[in-house]
Amino acid sequence: MISLHQVSKTYVTSNSRFQAVDAVSLEVGAGEIHGIIGSSGAGKSTLLRMINLLERPDEGTVIVDGNDLTSMTDKHLREARRSMGMIFQSFNLVNNRTVSGNVAMPLEMAGLGKKERAERVREYLDFMGIADKAEEYPSRLSGGQQQRVAIARALVNHPKVLLCDEPTSSLDPQTTVGILDVLKHINRTFGVTVVIVTHEMNVVTNMCTTVSMMENGGLINTFKAEQGNTISSEDISRITVGLSRDKVRDTHG
Ligand SMILES: Nc1ncnc2c1ncn2[C@@H]1O[C@H](COP(=O)(O)OP(=O)(O)OP(=O)(O)O)[C@@H](O)[C@H]1O
């Protein structure tokens, strides 16, 4: 479903250059819940943002659902992006729009008529269990409710892929479990492929079927759980041990 081939990204400021992602190749199969882990600054968010070209790679190709996004015109890229929803740690809702207004935004951009927009918004607010908040503004909602609005907004255009950047990092443990249940439900019900950047290992063990580890802009390792299973804490330990062994090898040539 998603194929990154040798993608690289260097951030250039007036007085510095920093290579955040260095020649990473990654395959994410249809229907996977794929976790991306690694220490702070490893390049996880940059890699995730390259999947929908929110960050354009300097080199390499990004293929999603058979389409090479890196060679598309801006018009075709805008259309292709409709098949990818994204959610963030800080929710990124528009504060001067109501919950309904936020969820309607992708439909407005796609040119849907008013009646169809209203129906679709209602359907997804119902699905997320927040229909009673439709006319509230985001500032009056809890973090968990705001993330549910953001998920509704990400889903309303029927995407095939959902990109999640630390979606539960600002939520308490109980709310986190509720949001992870929702993401699993979306994966199972709609077959949406989920890629999730996280530093919380309980998120990986709760829901991920595959996990990739990044370090210093590179992809160190990818580990896939047995069919029907999620990644276990033993799997994570194995990946981490693999990492330190690699490091030892690097250090000693
Ligand atoms: N817009 C930018 N301009 C300059 N440098 C950036 C920019 N975005 C990210 N970086 C740098 O690139 C590196 C990788 O950042 P990225 O956010 O991808 O890492 P991360 O693994 O997601 O980190 P964290 O877990 O802390 O969010 C970091 O050193 C960061 O400071």
Image (cartoon, grey):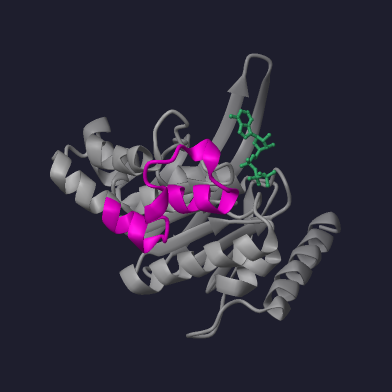
| Residue 141 counted in the magenta span | yes
Extreme residue toward the top, this view: 14
Which region is colored magenta? 122-150
Q: Nearer the viewer, residue 50 or 132?
A: 132
Point out the image quarter for the C terminus.
Answer: bottom right
In x, y percent, where is residue 74?
A: 27, 31
Left or right of 45 in this view: 39: right
Q: Please give the name of the residue rendered at 58% of the width and 48% of the height, measured from the top-left corner.
A: 142
In x, y percent, where is residue 53?
A: 41, 40
Q: Please give the name of the residue rendered at 40% of the width and 53% of the height, measured from the top-left corner.
A: 132
Q: Please give the name of the residue rendered at 80% of the width and 64% of the height, measured from the top-left corner.
A: 244
Q: Please give the name of the residue rendered at 70% of the width and 70% of the height, measured from the top-left corner.
A: 239
The quadrant of the rendered image in which ligand 1 is seen is top right
Q: Nearer the viewer, residue 137 or 5?
A: 137
Residue 221 visible to the viewer: no
In x, y percent, where is residue 135?
A: 37, 41
Q: How many marks?
A: 0
Left or right of 70 in this view: 28: right
Placement of 218 over or under 137, stated as above or below? below
Placement of 196 over or under 81, stated as above or below? below
